[in-house]
Amino acid sequence: MPGVPEAFSVARAAALGGAGWLQQRRLAAAEALQDAELPSPSEEEWRYSPVGKLRLETFAPASPEPANGPGGPLNRAALPAAASDLLGSLRRRLGGLSALVVTCDGKLAATEVSASAEAEGLAVRPLGEAPEPAGAPGGVGSPPADVFGLMNDAFCSAPALLEVPAGARLADPVAVVNIVTMPSLAAFPRLAVVVGDGAEAQVVNAVVSGGDEAFAAPVTEIEVGPSARLQFLNLQELGPCAIGIDRTTATVAAQGHLAVGFAAVGGAYARCRADCTLTGRGGTGDMSAMYFGDGEQVLDFRTFQNHLAPDTTSNLLFVGAVEDRARSIYSGLIRVGAEARGTDAQQTNRILKLSEEVWADSVPNLEIENNDVRCAHASSVGPIDEDHRFYLESRGVPPDVAERLIVEGFFGEVRGRLPVQSVAAGFDEMVRAKIGPNR
């Protein structure tokens, strides 16, 4: 199998600088990369994917030159239209923000924190120059699972920490926007979110790029404390020539609640791996996703619902539509540990095929080590129900409009379950933009 391209070198990682602990972590990852091989579709974790066809030699990590300093002015005029529109849309839909963090081409471009969020103790910190904190990269999730995790460890130039202290209640969401503007850039955003005991927060995390080739491999680590509540929405609006390989890892303590959602419409190949581990009794982890692929896009989702403690609950609903020659991939595992009696875990994936040339893989899995549980999984792949189409057309609805209405209705249940509803409701606009004005 091919190795890692030369541009991902130890010297390039060392040039990024930062605090001593961060430099050590980067160098260790970069050195490990030199002997690593890119994954193959023959590996179970990458089965069905086009990973063997990715041309990573055309990309290079960001140079060490600084962007705007933290808190510096954000020049929206210099951003691609999609990124500028996304920032404006987020502000309109959310009304107010507890904080805004923007990275551009792998570098921290701006941070803003509202007075009310500061009063609640919200900490928004760039980690590159700070002493090693509890929420440092790698402090929430497991060690890098693959070569792309190693790349993020080695070449993330602007890791950020959002820390919500115990008992805090943020009135407005936090928005984190990662923008890729440079052609052939490999960007590695890194975000750690730590929500303290009994705290409540909402976070929107977005990655967006223009029309040029780009490669983004974000890593997000989430820690939800006892009796804390977090809504986390991941928006993926990469350009049509971009590759995205995203990993989100979360842990939920006793009586904590995490709702994590994904809305994805972009990328030539866009992959999301989402793990939720329930470590404390009574913890809940809900996952939901809406995605729409067209052209020759490949949208790839892998999930892991990991129950380690008693009386924990997880509920997963992923819903997608594909048309033209697009492809969707879903593979998910519910694992119930030997000590996790009283687990209630659900997993559902539904895919709507809008043309005969699309391809959809859907593979749910269960691994259960305790008998006192309730677990279920379901999967469906199919075209539009002709009875639904006939009902609308028989009442004078034009065929293209009828299809659009059916697609929007297909997403109805999961749309209502996505976290941060003020932003999630905009998914219909994203879908309409893809299927065109005549539907």
Image (cartoon, rainbow, N blue to C red):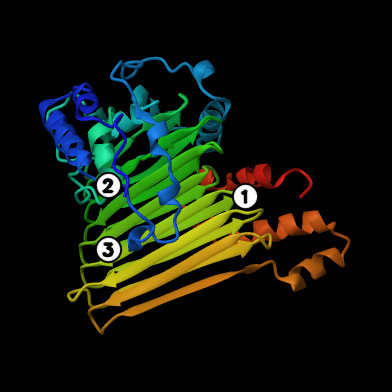
| 41 relative position to 212: left or right | left
- The residue indicated by pointer 2 is 37
Mark 2 to mark 1 CA distance (whole Å): 30 Å
Q: Earlier in the sequence, mark 2 or mark 1?
A: 2
Residue that lies at the very extreme toward the front in this rendered image: 1
Q: Nearer the viewer, residue 370 or 342?
A: 370
The disc labelled 3 sits on which kind of residue?
Gly
Q: Nearer the viewer, residue 194 or 304?
A: 304
Decide if residue 285 is in sight here: no
- The residue indicated by pointer 1 is 294
The disc labelled 1 sits on which kind of residue?
Asp
Residue density around tag 1, few if under 14, some if 14–19, many if 20 or more, within 10 Å = many
Q: Nearer the viewer, mark 3 or mark 1?
A: 1
In the structure shown, which secondary structural element does the residue marked by tag 2 occupy? loop
Mark 3 to mark 2 CA distance (whole Å): 37 Å
Residue density around tag 2, few if under 14, some if 14–19, many if 20 or more, within 10 Å = some
Question: Which residue shows up at 15% across the image and 28% down it?
Answer: 23
Decide if residue 237 is in sight here: yes
Judge whether 81 appears above or below 263 on screen: above
The disc labelled 2 sits on which kind of residue?
Glu
Q: Position of residue 32 (x, y in %)?
A: 17, 41
- The residue indicated by pointer 3 is 283
In the structure shown, which secondary structural element does the residue marked by tag 1 occupy? loop
Q: Nearer the viewer, mark 2 or mark 1?
A: 2
Q: Position of residue 434 (x, y in %)?
A: 66, 44
| 350 relative position to 113: left or right | right
Tell me whether circle 2 and circle 1 mark residues in contact (CB < 8 Å). Answer: no
Q: Earlier in the sequence, mark 3 or mark 2?
A: 2
Q: Position of residue 173 (x, y in %)?
A: 41, 39
